[in-house]
């Protein structure tokens, strides 16, 4: 994912979280305010109801008694009736509210207290000084923010709510003599007013959302500006740096990045340019060094080849004269066997012919053999760098099995067990890769530990476009200080073994000519692992 895309996603996520948190805070604040306002409105309505009842009780009722005598006109003299009629008119205009005069024994069944209202009445009875209750009352599955206030019966209330015998005839005729009577001074009913929670909270939600619209616009502008600045000051310069790094990865080291971003980006661009210059300079120096080394190597190979070839003639002459000496020695023996040769001469000549000359001849012969082996090795070393590579895709399973077949006698003689895994293919010159693995397998067999059964394992994997092969043995191992020396010409782990010490040197040269490498990991006394990385 691109840096600009990541930044945009992170910025969007951050803004969404910030807006959500801000909305939550605003909504919570608005909700608390709305609740308080709803409760306050309910209290005002209760005050209106109580004022109406007080007016009827204290003003209108006495006037009506003066006008009509002992008659009780319900519509003008009953505080509950007048207040209820007033609330009915109010609720027609504001149907979301509810107003109730809850009682434990009401005249009108609609005023019968529900379980919560009974608890509220009990609360006011046990708390004579309490004058208000706030909370949530559930009516017909709808929750209401509710305020309730107590209405405490006084002596003046007993005429209408005490003994039915003392009650006005008009009340008995309207409601009967069963409900709403039998109260005592201090008994409590409640007046309650409520507004639905969902109505209040919906208004809060809408109000909060409208209140956040300017903040949405501000955040949107901030998002656009921040995204544009990031693109200009960070993403674009980083993209240029990425293109420069990709050019280096492709082998082009002359690309430079112009500093156009922030101070840190400019410093990074300068560091990149310096790095590119250093790499370009180092590559040029390395190329010159490689060219020089290649030139020197070719000269050395030519010298080795010519020298080896030229030394072959005197070596052949020495070998011929050595055979001539043997022949002459045989002829001299025949001469000395003549009976006419004095015994003292025959005895003295016998010591020279039977011991001194054969001993010297043996030294000469072994030296000629050693010199011949060294010349052959030098020629092989020279040819390994001169031969033209014929690159093909190689079936390494077949190639390594072929190498193992050539070593069949030596493997049986050593008693070693060979474990061959599935090998990936590689690109290379078949003859030289065969030589590489022949040298590695020969080296492993030669350096097995005679104190334990030998085990040699060959495996391979594909990794980062290369085929990496491992030849592991449980042989004598290599000391840490010798692990790089073994790749030098004529270096041997055990000098007493056969060979000239050029096998691993040639194997490494073959790997390097294929743009690969050869290295070793070893633990002295336990075994070694030789790795060859070749083009896949």
Image (cartoon, rainbow, N blue to C red):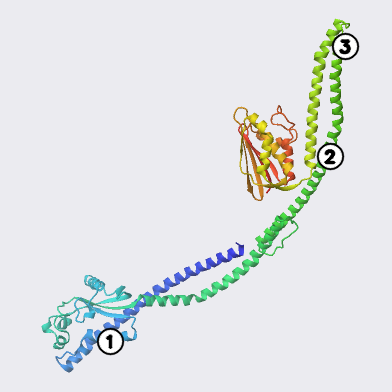
Disc 2 vs disc 1: which is toward the camera? 2
Which element is circle 1 on?
helix
Question: Mark 2 vs mark 1: which is more N-terminal?
Answer: 1
Rounded to the nearest angstrom, the CA distance separating label 3 from label 1 is: 165 Å
Q: Quadrant of residue 444?
A: top right
Sequence-wise first label, 3 or 2:
2
The residue where tag 3 is placed is: 335
Reading the image, the residue beneath label 2 is 302
User: Residue 109 location in percent, x, y?
Assistant: 21, 80
**Mark 1 neighbour class, 10 Å CA radius: few under 14, some 14 to 19, many 20 or more:** some
In this view, the mark in front (3 or 1):
3
Q: Residue 482: in sight, yes or no?
A: no
Quadrant in which residue 125 is drawn: bottom left
Q: Secondary structure at mark 2?
A: helix
Q: Determine the image quadrant of residue 201.
A: bottom left
Q: Residues within 10 Å of mark 2 (few under 14, many from 20)?
A: some
Q: Tell me: residue 355, above or below residue 302.
A: above
The answer to whether the residues at label 3 and label 2 have Cβ atoms under 8 Å apart is no
> Does residue 132 appear left or right of residue 26 in this picture?
left
Q: In the drawing, does residue 27 fall left or right of residue 182?
A: right
In the image, 9 versus 440, the foreground residue is 440
Does residue 15 appear left or right of residue 36 in this picture? right
Q: How packed is label 3: few (under 14 Cα within 10 Å), some, or many (20 or more)?
A: few
Query: Residue 267: percent from the left, percent from the top?
Result: 68, 59
Mark-to-mark CA distance, 3 and 2: 50 Å
Whether pointer 2 and pointer 1 mark residues with C-beta atoms closer than 8 Å, the reply is no
- Indicate the position of residue 231 as horizontal and vertical percent values: 63, 67
- Identify the residue at image location x=58%, y=66%: 8
The answer to whether 237 appears left or right of 107 in the picture is right
């Amino acid at each position: 994912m691109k840096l600009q895309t990541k930044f945009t996603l992170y910025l969007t996520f951050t803004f969404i979280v910030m807006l959500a948190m801000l909305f939550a805070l605003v909504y919570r604040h608005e909700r608390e305010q709305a609740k308080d306002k709803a409760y306050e409105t309910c209290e005002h309505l209760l005050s209106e109801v109580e004022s109406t009842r007080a007016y009827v009780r204290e003003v209108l009722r006495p006037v009506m008694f003066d006008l009509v005598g002992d008659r009780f006109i319900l519509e003008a003299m009953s505080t509950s009736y007048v207040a209820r009629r007033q609330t009915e008119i109010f609720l027609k205009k504001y149907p979301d509210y509810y107003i109730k005069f809850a009682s434990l024994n009401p005249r009108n069944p609609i005023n019968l207290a529900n379980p919560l209202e009974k608890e509220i009445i009990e609360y006011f009875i046990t708390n004579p000084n309490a004058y208000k209750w706030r909370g949530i009352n559930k009516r017909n599955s709808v929750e209401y923010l509710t305020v309730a206030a107590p209405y405490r019966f006084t002596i003046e209330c007993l005429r209408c709510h005490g003994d039915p015998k003392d009650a006005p005839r008009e009340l008995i005729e309207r409601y009967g003599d069963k409900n709403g009577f039998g109260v005592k001074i201090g008994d409590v009913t409640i007046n309650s007013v409520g507004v639905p929670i969902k109505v209040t909270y919906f208004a809060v939600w809408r109000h909060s959302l409208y209140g956040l619209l300017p903040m949405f616009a501000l955040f949107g502008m901030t998002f656009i500006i921040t995204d544009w600045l990031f693109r200009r000051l960070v993403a674009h310069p980083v993209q240029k740096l990425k293109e420069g790094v990709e050019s280096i990865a492709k082998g082009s080291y002359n690309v430079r990045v112009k500093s156009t971003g922030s101070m840190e980006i400019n410093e990074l661009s300068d560091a990149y340019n310096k790095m590119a210059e250093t790499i370009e300079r180092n590559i040029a120096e390395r190329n010159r060094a490689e060219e020089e080394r290649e030139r020197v190597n070719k000269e050395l190979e030519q010298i080795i080849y010519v020298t080896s070839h030229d030394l072959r003639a005197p070596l052949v002459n020495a070998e011929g004269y050595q055979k001539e000496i043997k022949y002459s020695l045989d002829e001299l023996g025949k001469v000395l066997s003549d009976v006419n040769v004095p015994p003292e001469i025959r005895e003295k000549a016998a010591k020279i012919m039977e011991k001194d000359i054969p001993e010297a001849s043996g030294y000469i012969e072994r030296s000629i053999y050693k010199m011949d082996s060294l010349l052959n090795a030098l020629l092989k070393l020279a040819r390994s760098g001169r031969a033209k590579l014929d690159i093909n895709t190689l079936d390494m399973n077949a190639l390594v099995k072929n190498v193992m077949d050539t070593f069949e006698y030596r493997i049986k003689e050593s008693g070693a067990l060979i474990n061959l895994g599935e090998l990936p293919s590689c690109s290379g010159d078949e003859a030289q890769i065969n030589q590489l693995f022949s040298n590695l397998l020969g080296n492993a067999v030669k350096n097995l530990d005679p104190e334990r059964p030998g085990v040699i394992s060959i495996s391979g994997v594909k990794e980062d476009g290369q085929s990496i092969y491992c030849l592991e043995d449980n042989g004598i191992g290599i000391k840490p200080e010798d692990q790089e020396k073994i790749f030098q010409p004529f270096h041997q782990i055990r000098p007493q073994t056969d060979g000239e010490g050029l096998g691993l040197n040639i194997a490494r040269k073959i790997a390097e000519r294929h743009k690969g490498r050869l290295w070793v990991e070893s633990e002295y006394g336990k075994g070694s692992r030789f790795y060859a990385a070749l083009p896949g």
